[in-house]
Amino acid sequence: MSSAALATAGGSDTTVIPIIRERGQREVFCGLTGIIWLHRKIQDAFFLVVGSRTCAHLIQSAAGVMIFAEPRFATAIIDERDLAGLADCNEELDRIVNQLLTRRPDIRLLFLVGSCPSEVIKLDLSRASSRLSKKFSPNVRVLNYSGSGIETTFTQGEDACLASMVPDLPAAPADAETSLMVVGSLADVVEDQFIRLFAALNIGPVRFFPPRHAADLAPVGKNTRYILAQPFLADTARALEERGATRIDAPFPLGVEGTTLWLKAVADVWGVSSGTFDAATATARERATRAVARYREELSGKRVFFFPDSQLEIPLARFLARELDVELVEVGTPFLHKQHLARELELMPKGVQLSEGQHVENQLDRCRAAKPDLVVCGLGLANPLEAEGMTTKWSIELVFTPIQGYDQAADLAELFARPLVRRMRLVA
Amino acid sequence: MQLTVWTYEGPPHVGAMRVATAMEGLHYVLHAPQGDTYADLLFTMIERNAKRPPVTYTTFQARDLGSDTAELFKTAARDAYLRFKPQAMIVGASCTAELIQDDPGGLSKALNLPIPVIPLELPSYQRKENYGASETFYQIVRALAGPTAPVLGTPRPVRVSGQRPRCNLLGPTALGFRHRDDVVEITKLLNELGIDINVVAPMGATPADIARLGEADFNVVMYPETASQAAQWLTRTFGQPATKIVPIGVGATHDFINEVAKLAGVDAAPLLNNTTSRAKWYAKSVDSTYLTSKRVFVFGDATHAVAAARIAKEEMGFTVVGIGTYSREFAREVREAAKIYGVEALITDDYLEVEAKVAELQPELVLGTQMERHIAKRFGVPCAVISAPVHVQDFPARYSPQMGFEGASVLFDTWVHPLMMGLEEHLIGMFRGDNEFHADAAPSHLGAAHKPLQNVVSPLVAAAQIGASVFEPILGLTSVSTPSSAAATIAGWALEAEKELNKIPFFVRGKARRNTERFASERGMSLITVETLYDAKAHFSR
């Protein structure tokens, strides 16, 4: 289980980055966890996990607190009768969906979300969803994707969810003007900031995917240019390309530099002059640079170790290294998409240690030996590492907090600075 | 299939983790897919454990299903043994691994590890967390204490005279509701009785400690949900009697002291005569008269629900209007208890059913779990949490047991404080119209610049009673109305009647409104006047 392989990553011959590839216990969430933010993003969608009590318990625990209102997610718990064939799983599922939609007539889009048990017993949710879609059309559309741990790691759940929506996007006419699609969940406030910036750059029409409402689907076709706002969307990208869309290659919009390069990549496609680009972005850029600088003092020279979590690790590490002078000890990621991360890897400091996959015990050994100033890790590891004397940052907060764009760059820096500041205060 | 929004209990392997995490020197190798490691954060975040749970997961993925998941399990088990050097190991499968039928027990046997390896069979699609904890503890006890068992039928050796009696405390686990503090409280209580503790298990016990459980004279079953199965086996195997009473509440603590004194052959009188319970005095004090006949709804695990109902009736002077549990294994005990209060027990793990029951009964206080806290919040009813499932708030930094005399005092405070808040809010409502106290007024003593501070001093509590009691008949229904949906045609309110209604304390106003509307609609009245309001009051008065 502890087989480690050393490989390299990088877009060109000049950037050779060592990668540790390990297999062992992976201390990561499964894709079902994405429901926590997806159900809030798409405000009239409901997520029905078809799984076990473990799935229900996971989502409840990952949500941290039980939400006051009735949530827009639930679990159809498979029981012994279903497994023993005493009950027909499809009939049972239809009954539950009926029950659910009767209670929640506000639902416009229902996702049947596959889980480890539903995959293992080979319950065909795609057939179930097309059957139910027909039944409840046009009021409710029913889609399906897998958020199972055997298929997906944490943020890959969002990838699977978005990919399942792509076939439903309307086709753009062949003569449609060139349009931009921003792909990946962003906080509404961040979207609104980007909308203003694109308007100032005279770029448009701009659509975001996923939409805030199920019916608000962006058309897609060969004149669609899409840019990823999140680094974990491999399947969604592939599905969009099958519909004719073309990816705009860019680093991710984290930090001032990342945001600028991300916007610039779009501006170049639209032929925006560098004068116009500078004029449109200068204010936000300067404001963000000043705000980030305040945290450089606290973070400069600090040694940071990333455990794998959301696939955001590489862009985050790039931001820390280049804008805050952080020294990267190891940057772990559950999965490294070389193509989507090519621009990021070019920006990474030479010789930085990456790791892909996980053997949590070995990684903890390396982490303890390296004695970093800050460990970015999941909630299962954070308190135990604090108790060992390390300072930690919960990685899940980096997924739940608006961190993209100029006006969030300093907030992002602050998330890393806060645990260090806190430690200093408590000692003093 | 069952539609589930929130669950009271996790899957059975989480119960096994609660036992493993409570113990020392034991390791759990769990055949489970990637993602099941989420369970670690229950322990590290909710309970704020400083150590990771002693669990190794195989975290298999789809690609492993095509190759050899059994080999993956063997490697994980071997590596876990070498790395953690446990005294004993438990092995099992989570829900998904149960489906692929790799047989962790058989596989680990083939490894020939030089320590006891205990296989667990926890049916994930049938049972839940508490079953998992109980079964795991039982299997561990059987496997580790079994080898020291005497020949069946051997009488227990007589205790050497002068030697203090010894007992085991059974049941406390990780993620238990105040288990940590209950152990301290009960240990203190038993020591005062002259009884020594042989082993506390699973909490803090090593496999070596489990092996010497048989040395005790008797067992204290602190939490039947996790310990009664193991205790029954110990009774059969070692002839150790076990306690039946769970010492939650003053009365139950008295009964418990008598019970253990008898089992240990010691005199309970000195301790019983010497204890003064603050909870008992507080309940007696005149300030507590406002607690009289408060309608309470109780829901939780069986042990805590049954105990809470008894305290509510006998020690607080409340009226128990409903009791229920999500522990189907202990439905019988809860049904028995329900008979005492003349109500029917609600046995369900569907929180929507519990919510409907609360809506129907309209209690003035809910004693429940974190789920009921949310239900109560939605209905604007005060609530205190008495039972697992746990929340980070259920692990307070301070000492806060539920058991023993100190536990009874903790319960008094915990239950009464939400009611105090209710009264305080009512008083704020009462004085809202005053010049110095309306919503936009600044507190006079802070000058004009400050925002209003909503606070009320306690002597005014008595005044609130008057307001509430005037309208008590409208509220104190014997027959219970269903939520507003029941009335098909609702009579309109005359302005004067509406004004009169607003004089009723806010926390009972909704009920008064509903009952008056029901009264009116049953009589085919289209307009509710002040007279109708008082007619309804008279109609419903006891």
Image (spheres, coloured by chain):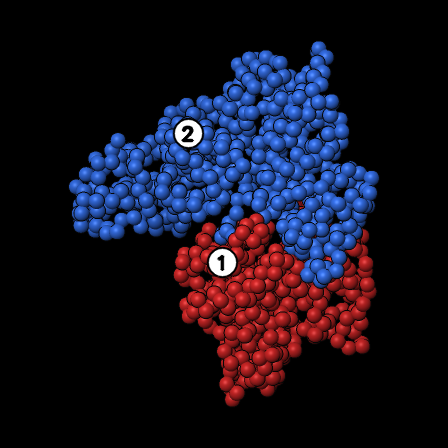
- Disc 2 target residue: B339
Residue pictured at 59% horizontal, 86% vertical: A271
**Residue B535, label in figure:** none
Which chain is in red here?
A: A
Viewed as shown, does residue B235 lie left or right of B405?
A: right
Of circles 2 and 1, the one toward us is: 1
Residue type at the position of mark 2: Lys
Q: Nearer the viewer, residue A16 or B93?
A: B93
Q: Where is mark 1, residue-wise?
A: A91
Specify the chain shown as blue: B
Look at 28% across and 45% down and name the residue there.
B514
The answer to whether one can see residue A64 in this image is no
Residue B485: horizontal and vertical position, in percent? 31, 50
Chain to which mark 1 belongs: A
Under tag 1, what secondary structure?
Answer: helix
Between B173 and A96, the one nearer to me in the picture: A96
Which amino acid, mark 1?
Glu
Q: Secondary structure at mark 2?
A: helix
